[in-house]
Amino acid sequence: MANIKVPYLDLKAQYQSIKPEIDAAIARVLDSCQFVLGSEVAGFEQEFATYCGTTECIALNSGTSALHLALLAAGVGPGDEVITVPFTFVASVAAVCYTGARPVLVDIDPRSFTMDPAAVEAAITPRTKAILPVHLYGQPADMDPIMEIARRHGLVVIEDAAQAHGAKYKGRPVGSIGDMACFSFYPGKNLGAYGEGGAVTTNNAEHARTVRMLRDWGQDRKYHHVLRGYNYRMEGFQGAILRVKLRYLEQWTEARRAVVAQYNQHLADTGVERPTEMPWARHVYHVYTLRADDRDSLQTALQAEGIQTGIHYPVPVHLQPAYADLGYGRGAFPRSEAAAAQVLSLPLYPELSSAAVAEVAGVVKKAVANRTQATVSR
Ligand SMILES: *Cc1c(COP(=O)(O)O)cnc(C)c1O
């Protein structure tokens, strides 16, 4: 394998750029000894709620926990159905199973890679309790028709915004559109902690109260357990670190968007399909995904030149062995299956240099040209 010339992600570059502030934040937590929840976490909750345009934010220990608790707060449990998509990270579907409910899957719109609202209505049954659209890659799902269907059928909408911090739908921040929204602060996410982290945002005080209790053993006060809860609390270090990083998020998002504009320019007229920013979206590009029929050979060509790529995601959830018992076979969701076979994510992070972008794009162009030639001479 070639040496890595352009990594897929570079968390060190970002840490170096804010090191004094991060180190001071960590020292504050050490001095206070508030290692779990505490004032830094409470401060982060307020600041992230403001950022999302919500009244409430509840900080948790992961995005998966956020999905789990949002579903429980929505009253989802055994016998219920929750509509979501198979073309997502497995957690969106896994969290539904944690509650004992059944995930009902619908296909994606092939341009946005997000839930196709036209497929939702037909999936609704008397057992349906909630709809869980995923803002995949940092692009909001088409929320207006999803909210309209939900209101008409009395369903709760939970946004999976784990990849979409700062994304907007028709000018409104994700996290404030559905009844609740779930964020992940896994280190590689657009807003990443230095460990695990997550949050639920909402404007619904009752849902917020339930999530707040469930994350801390279902207590309404110490050692009084009114709900069967969990240990899903955020650590003090993560709250302090996220407060620092939140102040840079807009700047980093703009840097991501600038990288994407460069990729788009370099890769115009190459025949390779670039991501589409939908008319409703401020896309925050958690990943920059190309589509190519010969995705695997393109990935191999890039790897040979020391360029790391990713595939998000190679197998849709309905074809994962762990979810075979949902009863969907191959062919159930053709657009998700086609996407899984064709997507390729290029290196993307705010600190990625123009030179590196040009180099990556150059290798893509060369590989595509070679392929065209091979096809012609065949
Ligand atoms: C990362 C992610 C999650 C899970 O978040 P964790 O913090 O890793 O538990 C859920 N949904 C999507 C779409 C994700 O990308």
Image: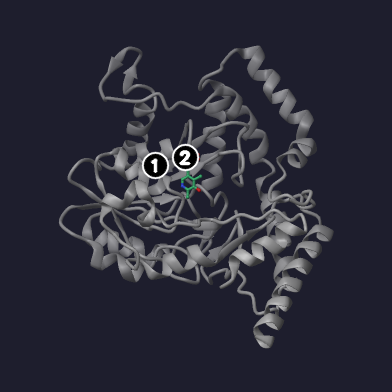
Image location of residue 285, percent across then percent down: 61, 57
Q: Mark 1 falls on what kind of element?
A: helix
Residue 239: in sight, yes or no? Answer: yes
Q: Position of residue 296 (x, y in %)?
A: 60, 64
> Which quarter of the figure has residue 244?
top right
Label for residue 63? 2
Q: Is mark 2 within 8 Å of ligand 1?
A: yes
The image's mark for residue 28 is none
Q: Nearer the viewer, residue 359 or 55?
A: 359
Q: For residue 26, what is the image quadrant?
A: top right
Look at the numbered disc 2 and give the secondary structure of its residue: helix
Question: For the point 25% across and 22% down, which residue is it?
Answer: 226
Measured as percent of width and height from the top left, residue 242 is found at 61, 34
Q: Are marks 1 and 2 in contact (CB under 8 Å)?
A: yes
Q: Closer to the camera, 196 or 178?
A: 196
Q: Which residue is mark 1?
A: 67
